[in-house]
Image (cartoon, rainbow, N blue to C red):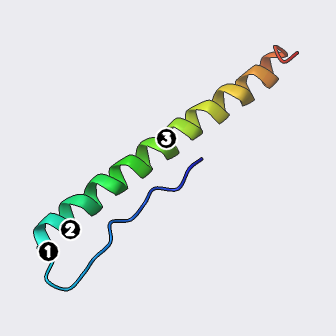
Amino acid sequence: MRPVATPPVSRGDDPKAKLAETRDALGEANRRINGSRAWYEAVREDYRAGEVQ
């Protein structure tokens, strides 16, 4: 799983814009975590069902 880049913050940046960028980065991170969780759960189900080759 690739890490999600955090938006850099510099003096003079618009706080609302940085907050929106951070929110978007966290949303992407959560999508990746949920995707990984679903993949791993499918692997576990395959093992339970004896469908692993």
Do tag 1 and tag 2 residues touch (Cβ < 8 Å)?
A: yes
Q: Is residue 35 above or below residue 53?
A: below
Tell me: 7 left or right of 18: right
Counting from the top left corner in percent of width and height, residue 28 is at 38, 47
**Number of residues whose C-alpha sits closer than 10 Å to that of mark 2, classed few (under 14), some (14–19) or many (20 or more):** some
Q: Quadrant of residue 14?
A: bottom left
Residue found at x 56% / y 32%:
38
Please tell me whether residue 23 is drawn above or below residue 36 in the rendered image: below
Q: Is 17 situated above or below 35?
A: below
Q: Amino acid at mark 3?
A: Asn
Q: Residue at x 81, y 13 (%)?
A: 51
Would residue 2 appear left or right of 11 to someone viewing this image? Answer: right
Mark 2 residue element: helix
Residue visible at 73% across and 30% down? 44
Residue picked out by circle 1:
15
User: What residue is drawn where x is 45% and y is 56%?
Assistant: 4
Badge 3 element: helix
Q: Label 2: which residue?
A: 18
Estimate the x, y position of residue 13 in percent, counting from the top left: 15, 76
Q: Are marks 3 and 2 in contact (CB under 8 Å)?
A: no
Q: CA distance from mark 1 to mark 2?
A: 5 Å
- Earlier residue among tags 3 and 2: 2
Crowd band around label 1 with a 10 angstrom C-alpha radius: few (<14), some (14–19), many (20+): few
| Residue behind mark 3 | 34
